[in-house]
Image (cartoon, rainbow, N blue to C red):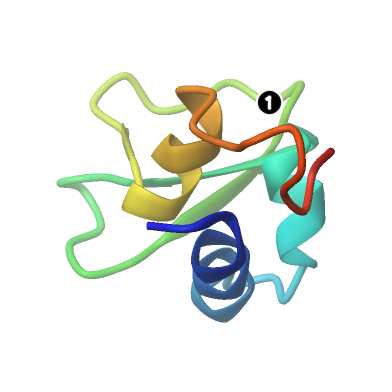
């Protein structure tokens, strides 16, 4: 997944309609949880994430540092 694709996916999946770039920079985090199947949960970086929460594919792209220095976050 490219940076642009991940940014678009973050923006589209966000239930709070927050810009994808804010997620890519780590201000907000997306995850899913078995407690809420089929839902994407959006948390501020200072919030406590659910223990069973798993990052979405697009969020994981940026969390793992897959973003290139010339990408949207550079």
Q: Residue at x 21, y 48 (%)?
A: 35
Answer above or below: position of 61 versus 17: above
Graded by Cα atoms within 10 Å as few (under 14), some (14 to 19) or many (20 or more), the crowding at tag 1 reads few
Q: Residue at x 25, y 45 (%)?
A: 33
Count of all numbered marks drawn on residues in the image = 1
The percent coordinates of residue 26 (x first, y second) are 73, 32
Which element carries disc 1, helix, strand or loop?
Answer: loop
Q: From the viewer's perspective, tell me whether residue 35 is left or right of residue 59.
A: left
The percent coordinates of residue 28 (x first, y second) are 71, 42
The percent coordinates of residue 71 (x first, y second) are 72, 49
Based on the displayed image, in which of its 4 quarters is residue 46 positioned? top right
Most distant residue in the front direction: 70
The percent coordinates of residue 11 (x first, y second) are 64, 73
Q: Quadrant of the N terminus?
A: bottom left
Answer above or below: position of 72 versus 16: above
Answer above or below: position of 28 versus 50: below
Q: Nearer the viewer, residue 10 or 38?
A: 10
Q: Residue at x 58, y 73 (%)?
A: 15
Q: Nearer the viewer, residue 53 or 65?
A: 65
Answer above or below: position of 72 versus 28: below
Q: Residue at x 61, y 66 (%)?
A: 4
- The residue that label 1 is drawn on is 47
Q: From the viewer's perspective, tell me whether residue 62 is left or right of residue 50.
A: right
Q: Quadrant of the C terminus?
A: top right
Based on the displayed image, in which of its 4 quarters is residue 12 positioned? bottom right
Q: From the viewer's perspective, tell me whether residue 41 is left or right of residue 74.
A: left
């Amino acid at each position: 997944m490219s940076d642009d694709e991940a940014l678009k996916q973050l923006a589209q999946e966000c239930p709070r309609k927050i810009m994808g770039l804010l997620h890519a920079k780590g201000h907000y985090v997306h995850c899913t949880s078995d407690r809420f199947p089929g839902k994407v949960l959006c948390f501020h970086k200072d919030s406590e994430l659910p223990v069973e929460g798993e990052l979405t594919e697009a969020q994981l792209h940026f969390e793992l540092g897959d973003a290139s220095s010339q990408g949207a976050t550079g």
